[in-house]
Image (tube, rainbow, N blue to C red):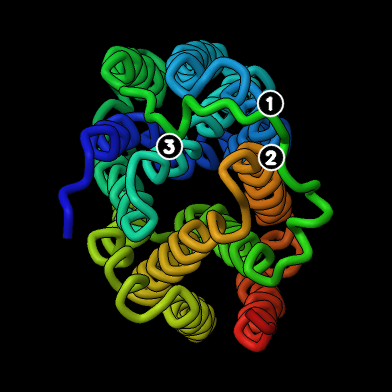
Amino acid sequence: MKMLPFNVWLLMAVGAISMTAAPMVVFCGGLIGAAIAPSTSLATLPVAIMVVGTAVAVIPVTLLMQRVGRKPAFILGSLMSIGGALLSAFAVAQSSFWLFCGGIFILGSGLAFVQQYRFAAMESVAPDQMASAAARVLLGGLIAAYIGPEITLESKDLLATPYVGGFVILAGLYLLSTLLLLLYKPTAMAAIQHEGTGRPLSTIIVQPVFWVAVLAAAVGYAIMSFIMTATPMSMHVDVGHSLADTKWVIQSHIMAMFIPSFFSGWLISRFGADKIMLSGILAFVLCVVIAFYDQALMNYWLALVLLGIGWNFLFVGGTSLLPRSYRDEERFKVQGFNEFFVFGFQAVASLSSGWVLYSFGWEALLIACLPLLLVVLAAIVWWRRAPV
């Protein structure tokens, strides 16, 4: 297999820094919310707001990249995230819940730029390396999975108000990512300007492969966020597991999201995207069964690890299929639709997670995931049976 180009490794490194915001907010967002929110039912809102920020920003981000190019847009996104981190720190110091949500919204919007890293990486390689390029970029999340919660816990009492120090450190990390992005080299494919706009979106979206790609990524992200957002509250607040145990479970989960990226690209090339996505569905089902059976520490841990693996297989599988549905000149509008659908769906899941947990309980939250998995399964069957 040919060596992946410089851009892929650079985007993996920058992604490792930039994705740190997500595990930080997942770990401490609900805990900060529980302390400063006007109502406990709003405790998980900051975590959901991060996803809403991503969903709202994805269309403007893709349009911006189409106009100015990937590199300037990536740098702008990183600078914006610095502001979001500093605003979040200030809001926590002032115990201002709604201002904190505003800072997290900006961080989520910055993550919309980061989500485009995998497409930029795929533009830097040949078609047979696209799955590997996307998977390598996602490996940056493995580092983020460790340093995000670790920074949060170790810096919890760094400044006068708990958790403020972590967001100040996050701003410094985004400054580093901004400097690294200056080394990014726009590719020939990304620089090509096409005279036409390609086929209308209404023609593109009737393809079975398009919906398998979109639904695999969207449902994978939605179920992962739905369960993950509720886990710290269920573990620490409802059941009484320690903060350290909660951190360990969340760290393990996020690491399980990205460790498979060492080999998921190769697995897709070897066995096909459909088989890997079916394996992801199976991992999700096992997650639900184990978490439903008991709320002991090891049940949370194993369920959340399986949740991470299932997400990786569905998300990487869907991402690798998406380019099969569009031509070069159509990539921005298709990628924009895909990202809006994926993160819009994830936003709904995150926003409803806390409400479902406190209204119906942990078990009902888990069972609600199963019908969505059936939708993805049906889409895969439809695609495989469709005429070529």
- Using the numbered discs, state the Cα–Cα distance from disc 3 to disc 2 in whole angstroms: 14 Å
Question: Which mark sits nearer the N-terminus, 1 or 3?
Answer: 1
Disc 3 residue crowd, few under 14, some 14–19, many 20+, Cα 10 Å: many
Q: In the picture, residue 364 is in which quadrant?
A: bottom right
What kind of residue is marked 2?
Answer: Lys
Vertically, is 44 above or below 217?
above
Per the image, label 1 sits on a secondary structure element best described as: helix
Q: What is the C-alpha distance between the residues marked 2 and 1?
A: 11 Å
- Amino acid carrying mark 3 in the image: Ala
Q: Using residue 31 as the reference point, say whether residue 219 is left or right of it.
A: right
Q: Nearer the viewer, mark 1 or mark 3?
A: 3
Left or right: 30 in relation to 128: right
Residue 88 circle label = none
Q: Quadrant of the C terminus?
A: bottom right
Q: Which mark identifies residue 60?
A: 1
Q: Nearer the viewer, residue 263 or 56?
A: 263
The residue where tag 3 is placed is 120
How many numbered circles does the render carry?
A: 3
Image point (28%, 39%), residue name = 8
Query: Looking at the picture, does residue 220 appear above or below residue 376?
Result: above
In the picture, which quadrant includes the N terminus?
Answer: bottom left
Q: Residue at x 35, y 39 (%)?
A: 124
Could one spot residue 249 in this view of the protein? no
Q: In the image, which is nearer the foreground, mark 2 or mark 1? A: 2
Q: Earlier in the sequence, mark 2 or mark 1?
A: 1
Q: Secondary structure at mark 2?
A: helix
361 versus 148 height, above or below: below
Q: Which residue is mark 2?
A: 333
- Asked if marks 1 and 3 touch (Cβ < 8 Å), the reply is no
Give the crowd class for mark 1: few <14, some 14-19, many >=20 residues within 10 Å: few
Q: CA distance from mark 1 to mark 3?
A: 17 Å
Q: Amino acid at mark 1?
A: Pro
